[in-house]
Image (spheres, grey):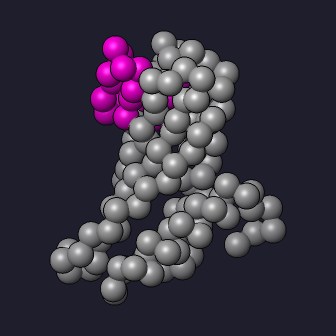
Amino acid sequence: MSARVSASEANVVSSLQKQVAAVPHADISLAAMIERAINVARQMRYFALVTRRAPFPELVPSAKRAGFILIREDTPNKETLFQWAEDKPDFTFSVSFKNPDIPSVIAESMVTSPAGSHKEHVCIHGFS
């Protein structure tokens, strides 16, 4: 891991290490796990920045410009789901402005054993 890893990236790496350790025979190397953690931490930082600086109506256009695909939008509840558009989507990002004083961002993924017999849910919470 590089010396320039942020606290949020370190937290994500720690969370993923615990999740992967809980999956017997998980088919993921430490290097792949660290790369995955750094990518999701960057994506979480993007959503944290947007939820601090922009109102809900600007979220979808901003996220699309940043390279995310809108999966679902619940306008009355001010909630959305996004995935990264490049490569294989790894995490689904749930962004909520339901409580306008404390918007939230949650990243979710599944870690699957090589045989597909065990799935472990990975969930990382972030609040703006």
Taking the view exactly as shown, the residue that stands out farthest to the right is 3
Instruction: Using the image, determine if residue 77 lies above or below residue 126.
Output: above
Horizontal and vertical percent for residue 22?
39, 79
Residue beneath the point at 32% across and 22% down? 74
85 displayed left or right of 8: left
Q: Does the rendering let one see residue 35?
A: no
Q: Within the magenta stretch, is there residue 63?
A: yes
Q: Residue at x 43, y 56 (%)?
A: 123
Residue 27's place in the image compared with 61, above or below, is: below
Farthest residue, direction bottom: 25
In the drawing, does residue 49 fall left or right of residue 55?
Answer: right
In x, y percent, where is residue 118? 23, 75
From this view, report whether residue 112 is shown above or below residue 114: above
Q: Is residue 74 magenta?
A: yes
- Front-most of 20 and 114? 20
Looking at the rendering, the stretch of residues picked out in magenta corresponds to: 62-81
User: Which quadrant of the rendered structure holds the C terminus?
Assistant: top right
- Total labels: the figure holds 0
Q: Quadrant of residue 45?
A: top right
* Viewer-nearest residue: 83 or 74: 74
Query: On screen, 73 above or below 57?
Result: below
Residue at image point 53% right, 66% down? 15
